[in-house]
Amino acid sequence: MVKTRILVVFAAISALLFTALATPASAEVRYNVLIQNSYTRKCLDVRDWSKENLAPVVQFDCHGGANQQWTLNTQTGIVTNAHSGKCLEIIGWVTGNGAYAVQYDCHYGANQQWNINRSNGVMVNRHSQKFLFVLNNSTANLAHVGQWDYNTSGPAVHWNIG
């Protein structure tokens, strides 16, 4: 009888542990969103629909194509392009102002991780602690997107995210 109770208790504890371990962590994942600059009204775009590593990420008139669609995981900070399947990163782990944003095979390093604040529309690179920004506050199509300090960046640091 005691042996049966111990087995029942053990089975119940095992079931609870299995259920707890099998439950996935909750993460906000938003699929195929456009990321539009609040100042220029242009969208984050992989230039020329490229699927190559190091293809520049620029701004371009919003057309909603897959090269302008991004999957955001706000828990991991990974931002993936829908067309190429590659991740948004700051090139070469550079931490200085003006470093370009590019796409690259996802390796999940800190230069591919972003703190995404949808309430104020900023995206901060976790490696450099700098903000995603349309360089020189340009309003032109194909203007490069990169990183810059927030306090000196100007208006092109805010994004409408999905």
Image (tube, grey):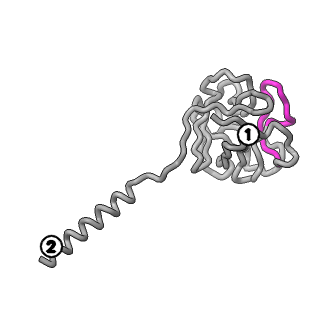
Q: In this rendering, which labeled residue sits more in front, label 2 or label 1?
A: 2
Residue depicted at x 54% and y 45%: 28
Figure quadrant of the C terminus: top right
Which residue is located at x 72 percent, y 33 percent? 57
Residue 55's tag is none
For the residue carrying disc 2, how many other residues have a C-alpha within 10 Å: few (<14), some (14-19), or many (20+)?
A: few
Decide: is 34 above or below 133. above
- Asked whether 109 or 63 is in front, the reply is 63
Amino acid on which disc 2 is placed: Thr
- The amino acid marked with disc number 1 is Ala
Residue 139 inside the magenta-drawn segment = yes
Which numbered marker is on residue 4? 2
Circle 2: element type = helix
Label 2, label 1: how far apart the Cα atoms are: 62 Å
Label 1 sits on residue? 101
Give the residues drawn in magenta, as a range: 134-149
Horizontal relation, residue 90 to residue 16: left or right: right
Looking at the picture, does residue 108 appear above or below residue 84?
below
User: x, y (%) of residue 128?
Assistant: 75, 52
Discs 2, 1 touching: Cβ within 8 Å: no
Q: Residues within 10 Å of mark 1 (few under 14, many from 20)?
A: many
Q: Which label's residue is closer to the chain start, 2 or 1?
A: 2
Percent of width and height locating residue 89: 68, 43
- Up/down of 92 relative to 63, above or below: below
Q: Residue at x 57, y 35 (%)?
A: 85
Residue at x-position 58% and y-position 50%: 76
Q: Is residue 99 magenta?
A: no
In which quadrant of the rendered view does residue 72 lie?
A: top right
**Whole-percent x, y for residue 86 in the image:** 60, 37
